[in-house]
Amino acid sequence: MINLIKALSVSLWSTLAVVAVISAAGIAIAVNGFDLRVSGGLALYFVIWWTLLFAILPFGVRSQAESGEVVAGSEPGAPTVHGLQEKAIWTSLVSSVVLVLVAAIFPLAGL
């Protein structure tokens, strides 16, 4: 799975396409399977995606100081390789799962 995500995140356009497909699938499942409106599904997905992005960002980051390659004039704690495209795909996968779980719990809560 990790190698597949690395392969899918080689370019900006492939990353955007994968994120769009995963997002659309998650929203479609939440809307069709759990009687959620499209606008509500989009809004809820947006909030979940941004919240989880900030939770996923620190995973796998090595600072310049840890790797021993500090660029002159930069912060030693800055990452050497950020991997934002992979993290966008991971965030979309996790967000879709969380959205479906939240949409499944809504009827139990009376919402």
Image (tube, grey):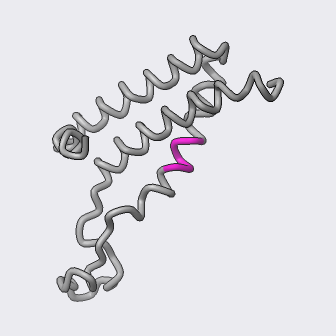
Residue at x 48% of width, y 32% of height: 96
The magenta stretch is 48-52
For this view, does 110 lie left or right of residue 14? right
Identify the image quadrant of residue 78. Answer: bottom left
- The quadrant the N terminus occupies is top left
Residue 101 forms part of the magenta stretch = no
Q: Is residue 15 left or right of residue 47?
A: left
Residue shown at the point (50%, 57%) measured from the top left: 55
Point out the residue furthest to the right here.
110
Say whether residue 49 is magenta.
yes
- As drawn, is 73 to the left or to the right of 35? left
Residue at horizontal 80 percent and vertical 29 percent from the top: 109
Q: Position of residue 8 (x, y in %)?
A: 21, 38
Image quadrant of residue 38?
A: top right
In terms of secondary structure, what is the magenta stretch mainly? helix
Height in image: 98 above or below 64?
above
User: x and y percent of residue 6 in the render?
Assistant: 20, 46
Please identify the quadrant where the C terminus is shown. top right
Q: Nearer the viewer, residue 70 or 57?
A: 57
- How many marks the image carries: the answer is 0
Q: Tell me what residue is drawn at x 75 percent, y 22 percent.
A: 107
